[in-house]
């Protein structure tokens, strides 16, 4: 299998960057999932869509926008009423999900080549993200598995908490390099490691 090309290009510079005087490092990385899918249910078909996602992925999604689940290599979360973002580290999820979601339930769109998946982790990850987005990133307000769709200066970001101190961010591939630089600038004050 050919390794996918990163949209980050020369902006992806592994190693340590910024001010480490505080000793609280933030880690930044690109996750490159094999499948990034948007599944949308027609009005009244949301529960059927959630059930189809569950059958294909094994993920038990809560009903409602913003709810989600993150397990091992598969993640899913609500990005709007009746609309979910589903990511898997393996390829082929779009075809599997499309066969489980018929035209009566909704639609499945493969966004694998249209989105870039970034990860921020570390004890100060909430603090860094709060510099960019008007959201409450604390664990009670943004629980494990939950997701939010928001913007930073008109750049759409779909964010999911995938660990106690870890978030995955999905941005348009065409804006990925610019957003990566902004994320680095926001983390610069604490110091960050690109992995």
Image (cartoon, rainbow, N blue to C red):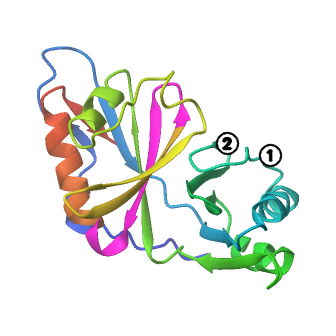
Residue drawn at the location 27% of the way across and 63% of the way down:
155
The relative height of residue 113 versus residue 67 in the rendered view (above or below) is below
The picture places residue 149, in percent across and down from the top left corner, at: 44, 54
The picture places residue 77, in percent across and down from the top left corner, at: 61, 51
**185 relative to 121 in the view: left or right:** left
State the residue lying farthest toward the bottom. Answer: 103
Question: Which residues are the magenta region?
Answer: 162-175
The relative height of residue 47 versus residue 140 in the rendered view (above or below) is below
Q: Are marks 2 and 1 in contact (CB under 8 Å)?
A: yes
**42 relative to 168 in the view: left or right:** right
Residue drawn at the location 18% of the way across and 54% of the way down:
181
Q: CA distance from mark 2 to mark 1?
A: 7 Å
**158 relative to 179 in the view: left or right:** right
Q: Disc 2 or 1, which lies upstream in sequence?
A: 1
Mark identifier at residue 69: 2
- Judged from the image, the secondary structure of the residue bearing numbered disc 1 is loop
Q: Quadrant of residue 84?
A: bottom right
- Judged from the image, the secondary structure of the residue bearing numbered disc 2 is strand
Residue drawn at the location 79% of the way across and 85% of the way down:
103
In the foreground, 28 or 168: 168
Whether residue 41 can be seen here? yes
Residue beneath disc 1: 60
Quarter of the image for the C terminus: give it: top left
């Amino acid at each position: 299998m050919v390794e996918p090309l990163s949209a980050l290009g020369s902006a992806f510079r592994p190693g340590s960057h910024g001010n480490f005087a505080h000793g609280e490092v933030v880690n930044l990385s690109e996750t490159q999932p094999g499948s990034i899918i948007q599944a949308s249910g027609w009005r009244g078909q949301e529960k059927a869509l959630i059930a189809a996602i569950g059958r294909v992925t094994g993920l038990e999604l809560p009903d409602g926008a913003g709810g989600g689940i993150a397990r091992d290599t598969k993640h899913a979360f609500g990005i709007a009423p009746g609309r979910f973002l589903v990511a898997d580290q393996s390829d082929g999820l779009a075809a599997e999900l499309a066969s489980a979601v018929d035209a009566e339930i909704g639609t499945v769109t493969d966004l694998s080549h249209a989105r870039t998946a970034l990860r921020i982790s570390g004890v100060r990850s909430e603090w860094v993200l709060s510099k960019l987005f008007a959201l409450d990133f604390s664990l009670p307000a943004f629980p494990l598995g939950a997701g939010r769709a928001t913007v930073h200066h008109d750049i759409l970001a779909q964010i999911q908490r995938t660990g106690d101190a870890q978030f995955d961010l999905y941005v348009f591939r065409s804006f990925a390099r610019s957003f990566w630089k902004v994320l680095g600038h926001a983390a610069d004050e604490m110091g960050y490691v690109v992995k």
